Image (cartoon, rainbow, N blue to C red):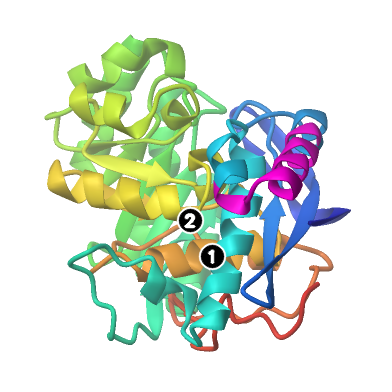
Amino acid sequence: MRVDPFTVALSPPLTTARGTIRERAGFLVGVEHAGVEGCGEATPLAGWTESRRECRRALDRAAAVADALDWGIALGKLDAPAARHALSLALADARAQAEDEPLYRSLDGPEGREQSDVQRVPVNATLGTDGTPEAVAGRAKKAVEAGYRCLKLKLGERGVEAELERVRAVRDAVGDGIALRVDANGAWPRREARRAIDGLAALGVAYVEQPVSTAAFDAAAELRGRGVDIALDESLAAYDVETVLEAEAADVLVLKPMVVGGPDLTAQAARLCREAGVEPVVSTTVDAVVARTGAVHVAASIPEVAPCGLATGDRIVRDLAPDPAPVSDGSIQVPQAAGLGLEAFP
């Protein structure tokens, strides 16, 4: 197994209620399987996955287990999600290359669409809310002009009324035909979350992502049914998908393959969501090209998937390889070449 460290800078940095992310650092993983080398990526994120040091240790342990036994056993022993993601993605890439098919087809379930071609997946544009409401509305109009039909606004840095003012300005600027989502990153106390959701309902917002903190998990279920769907994201770093579904705490689950532990587990989670009447949305932890492309394949494996949070490649100043999944007109291209579809191992 080959493990190579990397760091990529973000421009502009990603600012959320939990802080500002200026760079992403992780490991590229190469695995040979069936005579083919597959590529994976482990890009840990504080508060979501293991640390970078823990990730490297987990990858080293997996390599030792694989040398003594096999990759399947090594994968089963990994409990660090970013490390498991890298190994799972590399193995899936190698298998799909060996079978000469794009990765997303191998992620279909037993009743999936093995022979179907998925050319594109809808994506949302993510907008920061810094600046005046007019400035935010201007960025929203530009995103719609670029073809996006779904916008996500990052909230949680100011009072509820100021946040609603920005969402109202965006709604007035783009009209009722554009889907709006908001993401509070767990910043609101319960009472503020209720006030915010009531105001967002009046503005036709589709869903609010992580309105309360992970520690207030029980409050998420209480917030459902107020006119705006509840989406959970950070909660999946603390609770597994089955626990969240059993608690009936969400209408939407935002699935990040790096957090869930790999493309295989994410595709399984999406099927569990659909069975429970919960909508899966695939997103990333602002990863480099390997993991981001893997997430595109996961999204493509979900029938009639909702707009996903995959349009993040333009934040990478200098990526690890050419992007095989460019974004245009509000959707992202799904690579049709074998495996991930990367031109070469980064």
Q: Is residue 62 magenta?
A: yes
Q: Is residue 131 visible?
A: no
**In contact (CB < 8 Å): disc 1 and disc 2:** yes
Predominant secondary structure, magenta span: helix
Q: Under tag 2, what secondary structure?
A: helix
Residue at image position (43%, 36%) is 233
Amino acid identity at mark 2: Pro
- In this figure, which residue is indicated by the disc labeled 1? 92
- In this figure, which residue is indicated by the disc labeled 2? 263
Q: Is residue 70 left or right of residue 1?
A: left
Residue at image position (68%, 36%) is 45
Q: Earlier in the sequence, mark 1 or mark 2?
A: 1
Labels 1, 2: front one: 1
- Write down the quadrant of residue 329 in the picture: bottom left
Q: Under tag 1, what secondary structure?
A: helix
Q: Residue furthest front?
A: 68
The front one of 23 and 58 is 58
Residue at image position (30%, 51%) is 270
- Write down the quadrant of residue 247 in the picture: top left
Q: Is residue 206 left or right of residue 324?
A: left
Q: How many marks?
A: 2
Location of residue 169 with respect to 60 vertically, above or below: below
- Percent coordinates x, y for residue 29 in the rendering: 75, 57
Q: Is residue 281 magenta?
A: no
The front one of 160 and 315 is 315
- Percent coordinates x, y for residue 95 in the rendering: 54, 72
Q: Which residues are magenta?
A: 57-72
- Write down the quadrant of residue 222 in the picture: top left
Residues at marks 1 and 2, CA–CA distance in whole angstroms:
8 Å
Amino acid identity at mark 1: Ala
- Percent coordinates x, y for residue 160 in the rendering: 41, 25
